[in-house]
Amino acid sequence: MSDNPAESSSETNLATTSPVNSKTYLPGRRFYGVLLVVTILGFLVQWKAEWIAEFFPFAGRALSNILILPLILIALISWMRWFLFGSVYRWPAKVLVFLGIVSLPFLLKVEHSGDLFSLNVRLRMLAPDQLLALPEVQGDAGNRTENLFAKSTPFGGMLGSDRSGTLPDVELSSWSEFPPELLWTKEVGAGWSGFSAARGLAFTQEQRGDQELVTAYDIRSGNVIWFHTETARHVEELGGIGPRATPTIDGDQVFAQGATGILVCLELETGKLLWRRNVVEDVDSTRADDAVSILWGRSGSPWVEENLVIVPGGGRNQNFVSLIAYDRTTGEIVWKGGDQQISYSSPVGMTLDGQRQIVIVNESTVSGHDPQSGKQQWTHSRPGTSNTASNTSQPQQVDEDHLLVSKGYGLGAELLEIRNSEEGVSSVKSEWASPRVLRTKLTSAIVRNDVAFGLNDGILECIDLKDGSRLWKGKRYRHGQLLNVGKNLILLSESGDLFLIPASKEKSVSSQAVAALSGTTWNNLCLWGNYLLVRNARQAACFRLKFDSPNNQDAAEDPSE
């Protein structure tokens, strides 16, 4: 001990001012400062999300989620840094908490939306399709009453029998006076297939375990009449589980393509398998190559053109086939046409400038083909890749020589004029193109007279087809689906709510939301008579609608009664 009083006092001061332990039970001001900055930035990103989507149209609304994710990670890392190295908690507790946080992505699944992710979270082990056994058949269609197969108003494929998404001959009553009447709801297997309908049956595709199903439901009761299974399964983290295409009905046959490229022809009344093809093998590709190049699974719904069943082709190593046609009776290949990799759009027949054509949106082009030979008659650039910024929307015919194409990822809409010469050579002219309108990411536009409606990165809008100018922009419904019925639009939002909106050039007020489904909903709508069928990857539901005038009842009410 020093005899010097000054030295003794100095040592005493050092001992009393030096901290014994700076670690705490709660984080310090530095963490709360980081949390405050992150919260403010997150609020600004959400507040200006629509502005960001307009300024960066390639990313759209998803960019706001992309920007918020690192902010969340910064806050989490800041807290973890304090917890592991600045807190007084013992190391066993620190290790357990650290391992728990690291394991969360493996235990929990955030349900993806068209904007990358939503707030719906579930245990990964509870995949929706794994919860369901194969359905129980409740009735033999072949022995049921004749009413089931009487005359009907068919909705024979995706977006209707002509893929226009328009049923012009009926008018819906106001939903404020006559709201949709829920007839039934039930669990279904995973997948993004919509319903098609004919003869009192609704047809869809779904995943149950390792089985991919084509299922026929009684529209009035929701009972399963028959189902057909194929051992196949497609899974992708962002795109989800199960088949994507919608069955096509023509006459007494049902044609359906699964996510892995299995194409089947089934008997309508019984589900009996008439023939099967593997489209991936028919274009000399493999399942492994297909899963990389067509990342989110084959989504092309079959198109029936006279005696042909036509689907997108595909391929590998630059040996691509745009379309492949099969004999509808035997399943034999009739022709292969085009040389482009496929997208997530479906072929459709159109008569343009007096000439019948099969139009298809490919990976990076849109093209027209001779129905009898598959020969490409014209092509036009529509940039995209089928494993990133993909083409998914349907082309829509505007008039006798114009068609509308639309796409998300900043490409927007374009009006094309098709002209055919006497020598059989077709020309394409772009009338206008706009990256600001109809950025239809997971949906398709609807053409009605001289305007078009669509969800522009999730916001409903109306444009003038003459020049592509925006007439109005409405509410945000996210990446849902549209159906034009008479003078109204039925809109199914991505969150599963139904709305009725006037299909007008003037901005209109929508009906109150009708809760239909829970969870992400990307599946197309279906209307058979006055029965509205909706579904997503978990549930299906049927509503009965009221129509406006007695003149419409014969066409609109239950077609088999």
Image: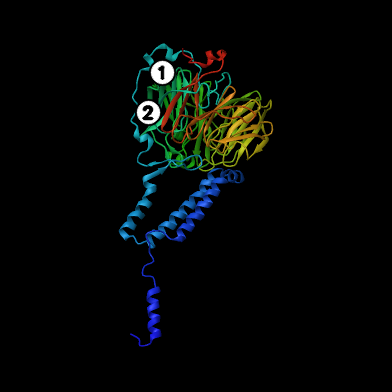
Per the image, the residue denoted by label 2 is 229
Asked if 350 appears above or below 552 in the picture, the reply is below
The type of residue carrying mark 1 is Glu
Q: How many marks?
A: 2
How is the protein colored in the picture?
rainbow
Which numbered disc covers residue 377? Answer: none
Q: Check the picture and name the quadrant holding the N terminus.
A: bottom left
Q: Position of residue 400 (x, y in %)?
A: 65, 24
Q: Residue furthest bottom?
A: 3
Q: Residues within 10 Å of mark 2 (few under 14, many from 20)?
A: some
**Helix, strand or loop at disc 2?**
strand
Q: Position of residue 408 (x, y in %)?
A: 57, 39
Tell me whether circle 2 and circle 1 mark residues in contact (CB < 8 Å).
no
Residue drawn 45% across and 42% down?
119
Query: Between disc 2 and disc 1, whose residue precedes?
Result: 2
Residue 405 at least partly seen: yes
Q: Nearer the viewer, residue 189 or 49?
A: 49
**Helix, strand or loop at disc 1?**
loop
Residue drawn 35% across and 62% down?
88
Q: Nearer the viewer, residue 231 or 154?
A: 154
The type of residue carrying mark 2 is Thr
The answer for how far apart the CA atoms under marks 2 and 1 are is 16 Å
- Image check: 138 left or right of 542? left
- Image check: 449 left or right of 104? right
Q: Position of residue 520 (x, y in %)?
A: 46, 36
Q: Residues within 10 Å of mark 1 (few under 14, many from 20)?
A: many
- Image check: 235 left or right of 356? left
Residue drawn 51% across and 55% down?
37
Q: Position of residue 43 (x, y in %)?
A: 53, 48
Asked if 10 appears above or below 523 in the picture, the reply is below
Asked if 291 appears above or below 530 in the picture, the reply is below
Per the image, the residue denoted by label 1 is 269
